[in-house]
Image (cartoon, rainbow, N blue to C red):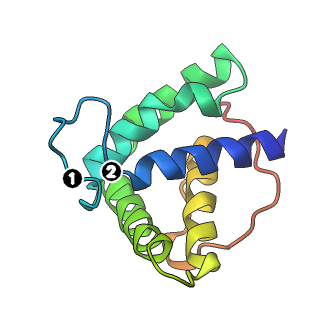
């Protein structure tokens, strides 16, 4: 189960790094840094990839609806750091893994400690918000 969540989170990270939400204009450059609002839009559009059931999908949607914008802004900071690392010849894998971990926390309806993001995480509970 956790493996599937990690794979989904990596897919989400790849989508987020592209910085092109579904409703974005086609001229939005791929290298443009994502904003908190774009991250939220990306996250909501990918909930089906994260949730293992309709009940969990609904729980994640409810949870994201009440999350303050500052959470999305902090996640965009983490994503933008990961985006920079991915573009390097020798990226710092810890920074990339921290971005994946942040997504996993949110998918588990938990706000990550953005100042102390682990590069790895134990199994997170399913969202039962």
Any part of residue 129 in sight: no
Mark 1 closeness class: few <14, some 14–19, many ≥20 residues within 10 Å: few
Sequence-wise, the earlier of marks 2 and 1 is 2
Judge left or right: residue 103 versus residue 25.
Answer: right
For this orientation, the residue located farthest to the front is 89
| Res 35 quadrant in image | bottom left
Q: Which mark is residue 48?
A: none
Q: Tell me the CA gap for discs 2 and 1.
A: 8 Å
Tell me: 69 left or right of 100: left
Estimate the x, y position of residue 18 in percent, counting from the top left.
38, 51
Mark 1 residue element: loop
Asked whether 66 or 53 is in front, the reply is 53
Q: Position of residue 7 (x, y in %)?
A: 71, 45
For mark 2, what is the residue?
19
Instruction: Identify whether 98 is placed above or below 90.
Output: above
Question: Count the marks: how many?
Answer: 2
Residue 94 in view, yes or no: yes
Is 95 situated above or below 62?
below
Residue at (72, 49) in percent of width and height? 6
Q: Nearer the viewer, residue 13 or 105?
A: 13
* Image side of residue 124 versus residue 98, left or right: right
Residue at the spot x=47%, y=80% of the render?
88
* Quadrant housing the C terminus: top right
Tell me, yes or no, whether the two marked residues, 2 and 1, touch with CB atoms within 8 Å. Answer: yes
- In the displayed structure image, the side of residue 23 where residue 61 appears, left or right: right
Residue 11, position in %: x, y? 59, 44
Coordinates of residue 94 in the picture (x, y in percent) = 63, 78
* Whether residue 81 is situated above or below residue 56 in the rendered picture: below
Q: Indicate whether 57 appears above or below 77.
A: above
Between label 2 and label 1, give the one nearer the viewer.
1
Element carrying mark 2: loop
Identify residue for label 1.
29
């Amino acid at each position: 189960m956790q493996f599937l969540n990690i794979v989904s989170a990596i897919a989400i990270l790849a989508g987020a790094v592209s910085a092109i939400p579904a409703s974005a204009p086609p001229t939005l450059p791929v290298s443009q840094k994502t904003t908190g609002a774009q991250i939220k839009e990306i996250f909501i559009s990918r909930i089906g990839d994260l949730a293992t059931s309709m009940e969990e999908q609904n729980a994640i949607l409810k949870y994201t609806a009440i999350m303050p914008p500052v959470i999305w802004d902090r996640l965009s900071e983490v994503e933008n750091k990961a985006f920079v690392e991915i573009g390097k010849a020798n990226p710092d894998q810890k920074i990339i893994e921290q971005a994946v971990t942040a997504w996993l926390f949110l998918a588990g309806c938990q706000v990550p400690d953005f100042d102390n993001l682990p590069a790895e995480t134990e199994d997170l509970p399913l969202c039962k918000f």
